[in-house]
Every structure is written in C-alpha cells, then in structure tokens.
Image (cartoon, rainbow, N blue to C red):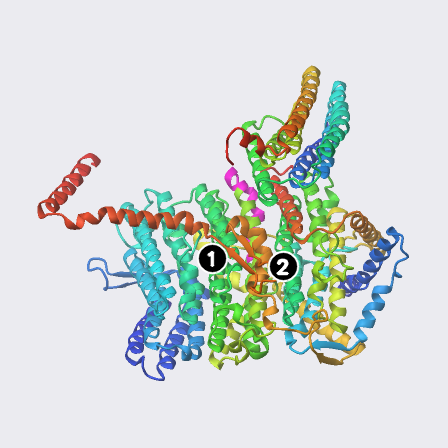
Amino acid sequence: MDVMLALALQGGQMCGVLLLAPLLLGFTRRLKARLLRRRGPPLLQPYRDLLKLVRKQVVLADNASWLFRGAPYVIFAATWVAAALVPTFAIGLTFSWIGDMIAVIALLGTARFLLALAGMDVGTSFGGIGSSREMLFASLAEPAMIMIVFTVALVAGSTQLSFVASFMHDNVSLRVSLGLAVAALAIVALAENARIPVDNPATHLELTMVHEAMVLEYGGRHLAMIELAAALKLLLYVSLVACIFLPWGLAATGSGAAAYAIGAALYLGKLAAGGFFMVLFETSIAKMRVFRVPQFLAAALMLGLLGTLLLFVSRSF
Amino acid sequence: MQGGIALWGVAVLLASAGVAALIASHRWARHVGYGLCLGACLGLMLASGHYLVLAPAPQSLHLPVGLPWTGAYFRLDPLAAYFLLVVNLGGAGASLFAIGYGRNEPQPARVLPFYPLFLAAMNLVVLADDAFGFLLAWELMSLASWALVVAHHHDPDNLRAGYIYILMASFGTLALLLAFGVLAASSGGYSFAEMRSASPAAPGLILLLALVGAGSKAGLVPLHVWLPLAHPAAPSHVSALMSGVMTKVAVYGFMRMVFDLNGAPAWWWSVLVITLAGISSLLGVLGALMQHDLKRLLAYHTVENIGIIFLGLGLALAFSAHALPAPAALALSAALFHVFNHSLFKSLLFFGSGAVLGATGERDMERLGGLIGRMPLTAFAFLTGAMAISALPPLNGFVSEWLTLQAILISPQLPSWALKLIVPAAGAMLALSAALAAACFVKAFGVTFLGRPRTAAAAAARETDRASLTAMLAAALLCLMAGVLPGPCLDALAPVVEALTGARMPPQSWLTALSLVPVAESRSSYNGLLVFVFVAAGTLLSIAVVYCVGSRAVRRGPAWDCGFPLVSPLSQYSADSFAQPIRRVFGRVVFQAREHVEMPPPGDARPARLTVTLKDLVWDGLYAPLAAGVVIAAERLNHLQFLTIRQYLSLVFVALVGLLLAVSIWT
Amino acid sequence: MDRHAFDVAHMLAGGLVLVSFMLLYQDRMFALLNVFAVHALVLSASIAWQAYIQGAEHLYVPAAIALLLKAVIIPIALRRIVIRLDIHRSIETVVGVGPTLFAGIALVALSMVVMLKATGASIDPLAREDLAFALSVVLLGLLMMVMRRNAVSQIVGFMSMENGLLLAATGAKGMPLVVEISIAFSVLVAFIVIGVFLFRIRERFDTVDVAALDSFRGERR
C-alpha cells in the first residue's frame, strides 16, 4: 500500500509538472501584458496553442532526416525527466535518488544538444545561427550552473536535491556564498529560458532571436513538443530556485495528506512569485546585444566560482 | 595463468606482424592480418578480464630474453590487467574496423606489418616488469606508431607531423629513461620489484620526469603539440588506436611510476598535475573548436580528455598525500573509468571519421554535410560517440565526469592552501570544457552529417561496409552499456584502486536498481539505467500520445528560409561560422584571434574577404624559441666538424680530465 | 553575540565584495555611478550594523557620513561632471570584462589566503573573514583603477578602495571616531581636487582619457 502511495505521489509529481508548465507560461505572458498595460492572452492560451499544434499537419523540409523528426520527442522526454527530478511539493519521492543536481543539468544539456543539432538539420542559415548562439550561451551557462551546484552542495554536503532542500530548511542562515549563488542562478535561469535580456521569447525578428531561430523549421506536433519542453524548462528553473532557496512547506516522506496539500498550495504560490519576479525584471530591462550576453553569463560563472572558492577556503561563508 | 596467456597473445601479435609483412601485397592480406590481430586482442581481453574478475595475486613471469644478466620480467597485477583490457578492447575494435576500412588503403604494405607490431608493443609496455623491458616496449610503440603516421608519406604535412612526433617521443623516452635511472640508483636493480621495495632518493624529481615522459606521450599541455598533427595523419583505424589506446598506455606509464614505484606523494605533486590537467582540458577543447578538419578536431579532444583523466589522477595524489584513502579511491576510480570510456568513444569517433573519409575522401568538414541521409548507421554511431564525449546522460562520458565532480566536491577536506585555490579553479575548467565539448560536437556532427551536402563527393557518399559498421555499432552499444550500468564497471575497478590507494569505493553492483553511490546516498547518487529507461519511456509515451490525439499527416516541402528559396549549400552555417561566436569570446585571449574584414568599396565586383589569424601561444612561446635556439647552437657547434686531429684529441683530453675532476670532487 | 548577528555582518561584507565586482563589470558611466551609490549604501548599512551589534554609538556617525556623502552627494556630483564632460558613453576598458573578472576572483582568493593565514586561529574566524573581505574590496578597487582608462571611473575605483578601508576599520572594533571622520573628509578633499583636475585635464587635452597624459609626458603606450 505504501509502495502504491509512493508511486502515486511520484506519478503525481510527473503529471503535475507537465500540467502546470503551460499554465506558468500563460501566467507570465498574461502578467507581462498587464505590466505593459495590455490585456494579454487568457491564462489557458498555451494549452490551446499546444492542442492546435498537435492537431496540425507537419510540414517537413525535403531533406529533413530522422534526427529532425525524432529529436522533439527525446528533447521533451529528457526535459520532462529533469523537471520531475526537482522536488516541487514534496521531498524524498520514490525516484528522487535517480539523479542529482548535476544529472538534472546534464539532462537539460542532452535536450539542448539535440535541439541544436535539429536546428542544423535542414541546412538553412537561420537554424545554424540559432544553434551556434545557443551553444555559445550554453558553454558559459552550463559551467556557471555547475559552479552554483558546487556552492550549494558544499554548503549542504549533498548534491541530492531532496537532501539539499531538507538541509536548507533545517539550517536556515544567511550565507555570503548562497547569496552569490542566488544571483548567479537568476542570471543562468534567464539565459537558459531564452528570456529578456538574453533572448526574446516573443520576437519574430530573425536576426535577434536565438531559441526561436533554431526551431524555425519546426511545425505541427514537433513544434508542440518543443514548446512544451521549453515550458517545462521554465518550470524546472523556478522549482529549482524554490526548492533550494525557499524550501518551506515541502512535505517530507510519509507525512499526511494535509502536509502534501500544504506543499502543493505553497508550490503554486512559489511558482506565481517566481513568475512575477521574472516578469518584473524582464519588463524593466532591455534586450542585450548578442555579444554582451557572454559577459553577462561570465559574471554568473564568476559569481559561482567565487562562492565555491569561498567555501573551499572556509566552511563558514 | 592469465599472464602466460597474455604473453602468448603478444607472441601471436608479433608473429602476425611477420606474416603480414610477407603477404602484404596479397588481396586477402588485410583479412588475414587484421583478423589475426582481432583474435589475439580478443584473447588478451578475455585473459585480462578473467584476471580482473577473479582478482588473484599478481602473477610474475621471467623469460631469459633481453639483457644477458637480467632477462625479462613480466607481471600481471590488477593495474596491468585493467590497462590490458583497455588496450585490447580498443585494439579489437580497431582491427575489426580495419578489416573493412583497409580497402581504402593505397599502400597496405606500409600499414599492415606495423599495425600488429604497434599492438604488441602497447601490450608489452603494460606487461613489462623491469625498466629495460618497459623502455624497450615504449620505444617500439613509438617507432611502430611513427611508421604508421608517415605511412602516407607523400603528403608533406604528414612528414612534418612524423618528424615532430618522433622528436617529442624521443624526448619523452629520455625523460622516462632518466626517471628509471633515478629509481634504479636507489634500488640498485632494474626490475620493478626491486624499485618497489626500495624508497627512492628523489621522489619529486621522479614525478617531474614521469610527468614529462608520460605526459608528452599522453598529450598533456604544453607537451601536446605533436598530437593534433600526428594522430590525424595516420590511417583512421591507427588514429583510433593512437588516440584511444596509446594515450592510455601513457597514462598507465604515469600511474605505474608515480602510484606504484615512487615513494609517498608530496602535496605539491598534485598541485602541478591538477594545474596542467585543468589547462589541458580547456586548451584542448578550445583548440578543437577552432578546427575544421574532422580528425584533427578529434585529436584535440584527446588532449581535453587526457586533461580530465589527469585531473582525477591529480586529485587522487592530493588525497593520498594527505592520507585520505577513501576520497583518493573515488578520484582514482573516476580517472580509470574515464580511461575506459574515452578509449571507447574516441575509437568510435575516429572510426566514424574514417568511414566518412572512406566514403567521401574528405576530412575537411567544410566540404561535407548531409551525410545522415546517405550513411544513416554511421551517423547514428557517430552521434552516440559525440553525445558520450560531450558528457551527456545516459551515456558513459557523463558518469566518469560526474564522478570527477564528486571527487572535487570532497576536496575542501584537503588542508593545503594551494589546493584549496586550485581545485575549484580546475573544477570550473572541467565544467567549462564539458560544455564547450558539447558545442564542439554539435559543430562536428551538425556540419558533417546534417544540412545539405556541400560538395559532389559528399552528395555521392554511400554507407560504409559491414565490418566497419559492426565495429562502430558495437562501440556505441558499449558506450551505452557503460553509461547505463556503471556500477559493475566500477566494481571491476575496485582491486586496481585498492592496490594503489589502499581503499576502494563502496561496492556498487547490488545497490537498488544498479544505482551509483560514490560516498553515501545522502550525498549523491545517480542511476543511469533508470534515467535511460525514463527518457526512453517518456519518448515512446509522447510519440504514442501525440499519434493518438493529434495528426499523423506529414507533408514534404522546400525549406522555408524567410521567403527566399534555398540557394547554394554554401549559404549554410559552416564549421568556422559555427565557432565564430566562441572564437570571439574565448579565442581573443587564448589564441590571440584577430579578424580582419576586407570590404571592397561599393561598385567594386571583388568579394569581401574575412581573414582570421590564430596564434598557437604554446608553440610560439615555447617551441619556436627552443627550435631557434637549437638552430643557433647547431650553427655555433658546426665548426667542431672541421678541427685538426690534435684539436680533437685535446677535446677528448679536456673531457676526460673534467670527468676525473668531477669524480674527485663528488666523492 | 549570536550567530545571526554575525551572519548579517558577514552577508553585508560579502555584499560589498559583490558590488565591487559589479563595479568591475559595469562599463557604462551612469550605471557605474548607480552601482557606486549602491556600494556606499551597503557600506553604510554594514557600518550601522556593526555599530548596532558592538553597541558603539559613535559608529553611527561614519555610517551617516557614508550614506550622505558617498551614496548621495558624490554620485550626484559625479553625474553632473559626467554630463558636463559629455562622456556618458561606454568606458573603454584596457582588458575585456572576462579577464578582469577573473583577475578579480584571483585577488579575492589571494586576500583570503593572506588574511586567513596571517591572522592566527586565536582570533574569531568571522572577524578574520570580514577582514579578508575588506582587503578584497581594497584590491578590487585598485584593480579597477588599473584596468580603467577613464578618469571618472578611476575616481570611482579610488573611492571603492576607500570604502574597503572603512569596512576593515569598523570591523576591527575600536577605531577612534576622529580617524574615521578625518578619513571621510580627506576623501572629500581628494574628490574635490580630482574633480578640479578633471576639468583642467579636459580643458587642456579635450579628453579625460588618462592615456592622453602619458603622451604629454612623452611616453608612448
């Protein structure tokens, strides 16, 4: 019975992130529109978009290969598994131990690798430009992320997210290194999710886009998979920040239904807060030139490195 | 018992070198020659694998060949058995690949006899148990591989590569010779058993010499200059051996000398090794990003991966020096597992580049493209290798890099200040190089296999032969297996690690669902099997759902390039344009990269030209002055050629008196 | 003194280092001045916190001075200077941002090692780490003065350096008030003097790039 319950919770998390991801996207779009004094699309618009895309016919380029057709599904699956590995409303779920923070980042790396390849598959110049820039950003964002993981792991003594969350919950304190890690994580999250100031998720001006340029050739169900993966990635980063730095309300293993309900409610609140701050930041800043982005990301890398270094020198930072 | 089998295997390899030399011109020569090698390698692999699984006591053998008063000693211990396994796994793969690939060889007589010799020499290095045999085998390995590098000697680039290679190889052997000299001075004998029992007089000096000697063979920065020249020059199956296997023999040499024969490590050894390793991993991958020759790109990645391996070794040294055996075991396991993984995926990638070379005659990525539709299986295998080397789960490269990162996360325990500063920096370099490697392999795979063919040769490519495909797909399968089931692999490493550090990682095989737990489950765990299963299940599930709910219709049409019909395939992103942003960000400092645009005035029909200049700072800063110095010194010494007999005699006399004086002062 | 009070002090000192990095990173004039104001703000908060936890009321004075002078008056004055000099465009750095930040990291590491090694284990570890932070701020300010060619950003570097000194002084418990006030005023004087010089330089050379001074001395860069 316990096993069934545990599996049900794990399944609930997996379905939950999948269902919530478009909602978060809709929420941020709506909020951003409101901040710009527009009405904005309805909250559920992303679901409608996805359904519409899934039902549409796929138009493939003449020379599109098996990689182009298969990649969206693998990208989606890898992102989904990564998103499900981050604790949302509870810690210590049945399969939480199959990957730690580094594995989560690397799974996102797998998804990005395939996406960048898919962008190059048809052989248009826009796909190439998108892939090239995406890999440039990733080549700085990923090490920055690893450094953030180092900082957090050295504080908490674990790279396992469930343990990190419970450590942070029990030993709450202000720490310089964690402050550095938060700043770096915010930068990386913006870059990884193709948000302003790094990339513009709403643009269709070809030369300024990165993520959209890569997926320019996609349509129909393939595009739906990729959009869903992007929404999942946004949810993943918000959950990651919430789980490491705001670990309150996460239900522990074996706690009652009330704890899980509180955890879920608080998680929704955290998502909303995360989306709000992201949108607030986005609306108050302009998009950067492409070659300023590496500096922005290098700053994140340096912050992460500084945090790690401080912790190597003394445990009390 | 297994030691004896191993020696017989080496004998078969040596014999097949002779056979191959005799029948090289025959049409079936490559089947016989490479087939013999394949059999011998498989036999050696089984013997060493059997030994590793049983992990009995070391087996020593003494043969009355070699120097008259010592003979030759051979020994099979866990370390040797492990590297024997790596060498022969790579050798078997390369031999299988070569059975098919050999048809592209214009002059088989220049390759066939040396290939088994090369394999035999690498096996002998691993088996040797005395300095004389070790150095002899090491030199044989260098010479045989040199002969293979200059096999296509009509190309002046290959000759230059061979020249630089033989120079660096001699230099490395010299350093090893001196290291063994220092070791033998304190032990009084040339066998490893005597060296092991004696405590060396100058362990620091031995470390430096071993680092130079083995590092120059492995391709550690700044001793790597020959590697990106020589590895691609050889035929592809030999490139695979040199990059995948020979560099591992060099790692073996380093480990044998430093972990086994030398005394207890001092803390500064690890500082040196970790610094060089971090720089190697970063410079290697940045060098690779600047290349558009597929094989040279792969060779630069060897430098990067050797850096990752040496990072693990350096961490193990650091932990050992501070008497922390359990973390040392973790770091060493990570390094050894990466040795295995790199030999797999690097061989696979070189096979893939060989298949492309065989099918199109091109190594330059800028003249390839669109091969995924023409060589789908090769593309699939290459993609697996590319994902493995980019450290992406669920493949094997990720597991060993993950273990290295875990070892770094334990290292704040180290008390030494220099290590506290260098280890996080090296960690950042490792993370940076892993991410850049992914960028580099998106470029390599994307430009070579994806898009539209850029030349007629690429458009006319056909899938490669069965033997080559079997070798590639087997290697790809092994990459996946090692990534999905790392636990048993690491358990097989336990006797090796235990012999060298006195501790081992906790047993992995029987943990829940084969997950990997380096220290404790509360600290970190990774389960490649379940990650793979979940990703695969998620993929299949999403396909099923989409096909049930949504449309299945597909329409093919011309690609949409913002309203323009697709023009020439040259308008695609090329390898250089893909790397341009990275070159602008990293290359400005590391390579002094400068871009110069020559733009003709309006109305002028000349094309605009972009000129990029890159400098190799290691070459310019270290080797060019050295070479210039040698030339100047040679010119100065030239007049010694034209002395009278009396002057020659006086030279001898002065030298003799000088030596006598030195002896009188010294003693 | 509970752990929490130390944590906040630590956090503020670390925040000052972080803002120093932001100064190094920022290469536009107005943004640089804003960041400098934040730098002074964090410093002022840090001093005030020290005054609170040490129970030393006299420390509120330098906190107020820092707040008023460095977070408000000097940035506004510099802003006016920048506008009058018409240099509110990008600063040309001698080396790129990446290497500068990397050098900054190395300096922080260096100051950590020097401070933690030099002061024995007998002293409270948190105070030692605060000292190390202060030294980092000083070194980062110096780095900024070395890396920038624009005279205004050199002033900012100089002042951030001085902020580091003040941080060290307040953390060390028991620096006389007179010294602090005199430091504050000497900085003010230095600021005025440099400001006057700036205009003189501009009048003479039509630029505030200090490289112009080198050519005046007959040196070639």
Q: Is residue B110 magenta?
A: no
Q: Left or right of B532: which side holds B31?
A: left
- Looking at this view, is B576 or A27 the one in front? B576
Report the predominant secondary structure element of the magenta stretch: helix
Q: Quadrant of residue C64?
A: top right
Q: Left or right of B565: which side holds B608?
A: left
Q: Position of residue B589 (x, y in %)?
A: 53, 48
Quarter of the picture containing the N terminus of chain B is: bottom left
Up-down: is C158 above or below B16?
Answer: above
Q: Secondary structure at mark 2?
A: helix
Label 1, on which residue? B303
- Looking at this view, is A264 or A38 the one in front? A38
Identify which residue is drawn at 34% across, 72% down. Answer: B116
Q: Quadrant of residue B6?
A: bottom left
> Do the residues at pointers 1 and 2 share their chain?
no
Task: Decide if residue B391 is in sight here.
Answer: no
CA–CA distance in space, label 1 to label 2 = 21 Å
Q: Left or right of B587: which side holds B118?
A: left
Label 2, on which residue? A135
**Badge 2 density bin: few <14, some 14–19, many ≥20, Cα 10 Å:** many
Identify residue type, mark 2: Met
Task: Decide if residue C119 is in sight here.
Answer: yes
Q: Magenta segment range?
A: B401-421
